[in-house]
Amino acid sequence: MSYGTGNWVHSRVSSSKHERQSIVTLVEASKKYAGLRWSGSKDDPQNIAFSGEIGVNPSQMQTKIRAFIRFGFLKDKNVCPLEWTRLGEIWRNLVLNGGANLANYTDRLEDLILASALIFYSFDSNGISINPTTNYRPIIELFQIADKNGNISKSALERLIGVSNLSYWLKDLVNAGFLKQINNHFQIGDKFPILMHAVRNTSLQTNLTDSDWKQIKDDCLDNRNSYKSAILAELTRITEGVLDIEATLPLAQKDIVSEVLNLIDEEESTEIEQGDYKVPEEYGKAKKRKKQNAWSKKVREDYNYICAVPQCDIRAPEFTEAAHIKKYPEKEEREGHRANPYNGICLCPLCHSLFDKGYFTLSDELKITLSPAFSNLASHRLREAVEKSQNQKIKMPKRFLPKKEFISYHRTKTFRNS
């Protein structure tokens, strides 16, 4: 059988919300069946028990799992436990913990995951293929039948897709934002304009193997993905909306927002590594937060997540913070200070607070200098650790030694010298 124009293959599992919710249940249940080949015999008692977790038979379960691998939510593997893709893991956290407050953003992420998978869909004589550069790509064909205004008639879509799978494909294409329905005709969608532009104008690498493409589909933020920057930009657009309501969220949901930002700050981490330390005011909220997250990780990693105060014994990623030496709100100058790892020091929360309030500073030799006001502080074990560190050199970072210009700023502008 030939697949292509007039015969677009489909698993006949839709990308509807009901189906997506069932796959969350299935992934959680798969942990109990570690080592089970879910794609194996439909008569296997374990496969029967596994499929029963969502009230279907093994054949239906296998179809659903294969569909959600193709939809971009699950990694392509045949053995339990099932694993989320990189974007699928973010979505799963939002589904389980985001609640009604983040429901709109969960929906947008669902649609972006589907769009990020469909751009790689391709058909060969056997059906859906791995390598999108050597076979028929339905998304490219869809763009080509639209008129100059982006309009496509339903009859044109029937000729392109084929009647038998038309309803399934239309649902997926609308959910993914590639199409929108206007009365009795369709139009190329505008839900993810940056990604759409990339697909139309960016060529995929042609020297990648099937194994490479499998890895890219498991993690669409892989550096070999020609559309990576566009997908990150669309994720940032979604996150901008979340940050607009972040202040109103309960703590657990704020933590989820932070987790999402931590997973997508790779571009900002690269910028910092290449010496781009500025965070201009015109950056959007998400871009600013991602760059600050990347800066914080880089500083804390450089100190091995150990508080730099000599006599403080706090160490651990969850109990240390990156402190700006020159305060973040100050106007950017020359090379920039807001995301400059040479303007950071790793401290525990209490030492961070004391440093920011000027109760201690650093000498040019990186020794702890206490403020005269320090003696007014209430006694506390960590306060005593700072006090015992007077005139001692901080614990040294591996790479980013605090610069004298930033230390001088802290002594002059922040330190309580009287």
Image (cartoon, helix red, strand yellow):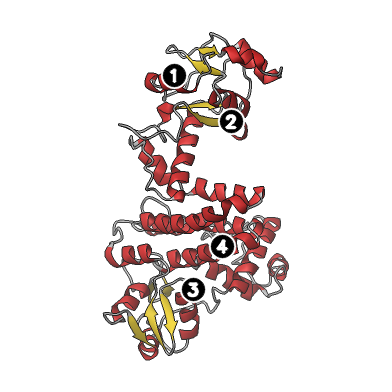
Quick check: marks 3 and 4 in contact, CB under 8 Å?
no
**Label 1: few (<14), some or many (≥20) within 10 Å?**
few
Q: Is residue 23 above or below residue 255?
A: below
Quick check: marks 2 and 4 in contact, CB under 8 Å?
no
Tell me if residue 27 can be seen: no
Q: CA distance from mark 2 to mark 3?
A: 42 Å
Q: Secondary structure at mark 1?
A: helix
Given residues 204 and 153, the one toward you in this image is: 153
Which labelled disc corresponds to residue 412? 1
Q: Secondary structure at mark 3?
A: helix
Q: Is residue 77 above or below residue 4?
A: above
Name the amino acid type tagged 3: Asn
Which labelled disc corresponds to residue 175? 3
Residue identifier under label 4: 106
Q: CA distance from mark 2 to mark 1?
A: 25 Å
Residue identifier under label 2: 320
Please name which of the two marks, 3 or 1, marks the residue nearer to the observer.
1
* Precedes in sequence: disc 3 or disc 4: 4
* Precedes in sequence: disc 2 or disc 4: 4
Name the amino acid type tagged 2: Thr
